[in-house]
Amino acid sequence: MMEIDHTNLSRLDLNLLVAFDALLSERSVTKAASRVGLGQSAMSHNLARLRRLFGDELFTRGADGMRPTPRALALAQPVQEALRKVQSAVLQGGAFNPATANRVFRIGLADSIEVAIVPALVERLQTLAPGVSLRLRPANRGDILQELDSGQLDLGIGVFEHGQIYHFRRQLYTDHFLCLFSPEQLGLSPPLTLEQYLAFPHILTSLTDDTRGVVDEALAKRKLRRKVVMTTPGFLAVPFVVRRSRVMITMPSRLAHYFAEAFSLATSPVPIKLPRFTISLLWHASFNQDLSHMWLRQTIASLVSEDSLEL
């Protein structure tokens, strides 16, 4: 274990690290000052002290705001981890009481998972932790690690296949795909045959412009293709389109069952073999021992195992 250098550390003002983290998040002296409750001149003074301390400009001016230097980016993770540990050890006082806690959690997740998890979670928070609030935002698997590392997100919920040694993951549940369609529009009833499945246009959910998904990969292995007439980054409009059009969509089973019940639609097993997928929690190591974070993770895991999430 590294010995603490009290002599050199005594020259470091913890407030400078707080200022650094705010500057890194906001990329603006004015916004960073507002975030930590300082005047703009005081934050400018802190930035000057930070530059002397680290012997680097840390932030340079750009068209889109202040840009961190490579040195600043290298400092980001260890500084944020240190601040979170101090916050957990000092401000939480060694205990977490959900009934009296005031905490905002920023969670990244797809809207399909939001429908499956969030209603029951909000209900539980209202009962056990009325001072805890959620800030939800869409999660792109390509950006989630960076958002966790930068502190933009506290927690990710989704399909996560990659991570670094400082990312922790907890499996929640395994799901599979179902086909959702309108029996009235298509004149079909489940289960669908492969011929019926390929006879009608499809909707594809994708966060990119790619018109190929897991279904298309599976079909390509059999030298088959489907017609995709619409791509969308989320599922919000899907049941409304399916109810009124001669189209179908392949989607996670939990959400498909919910839409089928709510919109008088039908589900069918997909007539081609598709992989199952696992939904997990993902968080940065700096939150691993945070008591409030631990409580939220356990609360979500408990809800997933209860009947309230069986759609």
Image: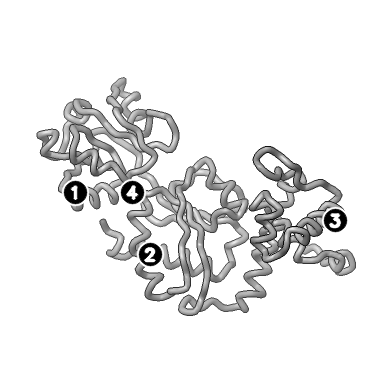
Q: Secondary structure at mark 4?
A: strand
Task: Residue at 49%, 53% (x, y): give it.
Answer: 156
Residue 248 rendering spot, x and y as whole percentages: 23, 35
Distance between mark 3 and mark 4 Cα atoms: 51 Å
Q: Which mark is residue 83?
A: none
Q: Nearer the viewer, residue 222 or 69?
A: 69
User: Is mark 3 in CB contact (under 8 Å) with mark 2?
Assistant: no
* Label 1 element class: helix
Question: What type is the residue that disc 2 sits on?
Answer: Leu
Mark 3 or mark 2, whichever is nearer to me: 3
Residue depth check, mark 2 versus mark 4: number of the one nearer the observer? 2
Instruction: Report which residue position mark 3 lands on.
Output: 53
Precedes in sequence: disc 2 or disc 4 = 2
What label sits on residue 263 in the rendered view? 1
**Within 10 Å of the Cα at label 4, are there few (<14), some (14-19), or many (20+) other Cα atoms?**
some
Q: Nearer the viewer, residue 263 or 65?
A: 65
First reached walking from the N terminus: tag 3 or tag 4:
3
Q: Nearer the viewer, mark 3 or mark 4?
A: 3
Q: Earlier in the sequence, mark 3 or mark 1?
A: 3
Q: Which residue is mark 2?
A: 121
Q: Is residue 212 above or below residue 149?
A: above
Amino acid bearing label 4: Asp
**Label 3 neighbour load within 10 Å: few <14, some 14-19, many 20+:** few
- Please provide percent x and percent y for residue 175: 33, 49
Mark 1 is surrounded, within 10 Å at the Cα level, by few (under 14), some (14 to 19) or many (20 or more) other residues, namely few
